[in-house]
Image (cartoon, rainbow, N blue to C red):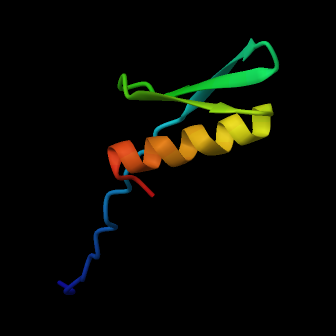
Amino acid sequence: MRNKTITAKPATAQKSKLTIAFQDFNGVFLAKISNLKGRETFAYGETKNLAQINALRNYRTKYQTV
């Protein structure tokens, strides 16, 4: 009988997918970002890109994620 060393791989955390929805308010965009667990936050921006960046920043700050 031979000795065998087995190394278990650490469990990988499932990354949650974020969904971003936009709404136009007379030239200013509102971005709503949410995940499957019900976490959500909002942000405004002059463009969709800026609204998305602001929403991601707010989400990370609010839920202390990276």
Q: Quadrant of the N terminus?
A: bottom left
Q: Quadrant of the C terminus?
A: bottom left
Q: Nearer the viewer, residue 32 or 8?
A: 32
Residue 57: x and y in percent read 53, 48
* Residue at point 53%, 35% (across, down): 17
* Residue at point 62%, 27% (across, down): 20
Q: Quadrant of residue 27?
A: top right
Residue 6: x and y in percent read 26, 76
* Residue at point 34%, 44% (across, down): 63
In the rendered picture of this protein, how many numbered marks are placed on residues?
0
* Residue at point 36%, 43% (across, down): 62
Residue 43 sits above or below residue 27 on the image: below
Q: Residue furthest front?
A: 26
Residue 57 sits above or below residue 22 on the image: below
Q: Nearer the viewer, residue 56 or 45?
A: 45
Is residue 15 in sight in this rendering? no
Residue 31: x and y in percent read 63, 26
Q: Nearer the viewer, residue 66 or 31?
A: 31
Query: Image check: 25 left or right of 61?
Result: right
Is residue 14 in sight in this rendering? yes
Query: Image check: 23 left or right of 34?
Result: right
Query: Image check: 5 left or right of 56?
Result: left
